[in-house]
Amino acid sequence: MSKASKTSSLGKSYAAWNKLGTSNKAKFNELIARAENFAQDVVKKGASSAFAKHRKQSTKSAAMLVLLREGGLVVASVFGVKSCFEVVREVWK
């Protein structure tokens, strides 16, 4: 089996996942906490403001966005809805 390149969606997702903590449990808990905080900011300030804030807020917040964006693309590819996800992904750039 070959490795995913660091520039592929899978490689970016994995790198972002590793920035979230030391154990898988800690990473998952951090992801959930950051995603909840991001969702609250979207409701309060709108999507554009929330994305801007979380991109520059901290390494873990930025990693959460990369993981959701790139990981979502990997999952969408598996389920055969990649082109639909890419339309949504354009908003996240």
Image: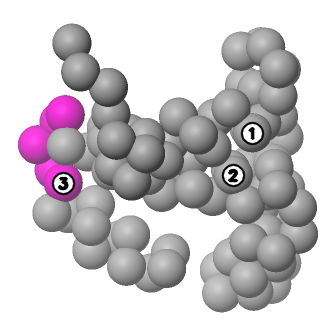
Question: Judging from the image, what secondary structure is the residue with disc 1 in?
Answer: helix
- Residue at x 16% of width, y 50% of height: 81
Q: Earlier in the sequence, mark 2 or mark 1?
A: 1
Disc sitting over residue 33 in the figure: none
Place of residue 39 in the rendered image (x, y in percent of width and height, measured from the top left)? 73, 60
Q: Which residue is mark 1?
A: 19
Q: Which residue is mark 3?
A: 82
Question: Judging from the image, what secondary structure is the residue with disc 3 in?
Answer: helix
* Magenta run includes residue 79: yes
Q: Tell me: residue 46, above or below residue 37.
A: below
- How busy is the neighbourhood of tag 2: few (under 14 within 10 Å), some, or many (20 plus)? many
Disc sitting over residue 63 in the figure: 2
* Magenta run includes residue 75: no
- In the shown orientation, is residue 47 left or right of residue 11? right
- How busy is the neighbourhood of tag 3: few (under 14 within 10 Å), some, or many (20 plus)? some
Place of residue 27 in the rendered image (x, y in percent of width and height, measured from the top left)? 76, 26
Q: Amino acid at mark 3?
A: Lys
Q: Tell me: residue 26, above or below residue 8.
A: above
